Image (spheres, rainbow, N blue to C red):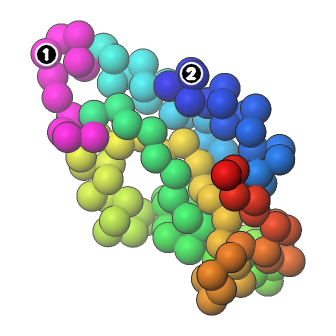
Amino acid sequence: MQAVLDRARECNPHLNAIVYERFDAALERSREADAARASGESWGPLHGVPVTIKENVDVAGMPTPNGVRAFEGVVAPDDSPVVRNLLAAGAIVIGRTTTPEFSMRASTDSPLHGRTRNPW
């Protein structure tokens, strides 16, 4: 997990992809995942796999602005079904990634977060 987070920190200033980080919580959760695996426990097929969630999908306690400046303060009270399923399968959410306004464009360039660049 540390390598993933280090790489995200290295690349994100140029890419502008991750706009809401949960790196500290993800690192702690990965330690729990390692301990569980060491004791023979499995959280599911995504045990310890780091994932990001687009900012148009609810993650409890995190902003869900959908690329819209007016919605910047909207915080999700609960996880969406897809996030619940990912967590139930053992995934670890490391942060939220950008979307264009209302998720209505093929590329991401929003007034809220600016342009997201393709690394390739």
Q: Amino acid at mark 1?
A: Gly
**How would you rate the neighbour count of disc 2 (Cα within 10 Å): few for under 14, some for 14-19, many for 20 or more?**
few
Q: Which residues are magenta?
A: 36-46
> Where is residue 42, by image quadrant?
top left
Q: Give residue 100's quadrant in the image.
A: bottom right
Report whether residue 65 is seen. Answer: no
In this view, the residue in front, 71 or 93, is 93
Residue occupying the point 79% across, 76% down: 110
Of 47 and 117, the residue lying toward us? 117
Numbered disc 1: secondary structure: loop
Q: CA distance from mark 2 to mark 1?
A: 22 Å
Instruction: Indicate whether 57 appears above or below 27.
Output: below
> Mark 2 highlights which residue?
2
Q: Considering only vertical position in the picture, is 81 above or below 105?
A: above
For residue 42: magenta? Answer: yes
Q: Quadrant of residue 65?
A: bottom right
* Residue 85 located left or right of residue 113: left
Badge 2 marks a residue whose secondary structure is: helix
Q: Residue at x 51, y 58 (%)?
A: 53
Residue 10's spot in the image, x, y percent?
76, 32
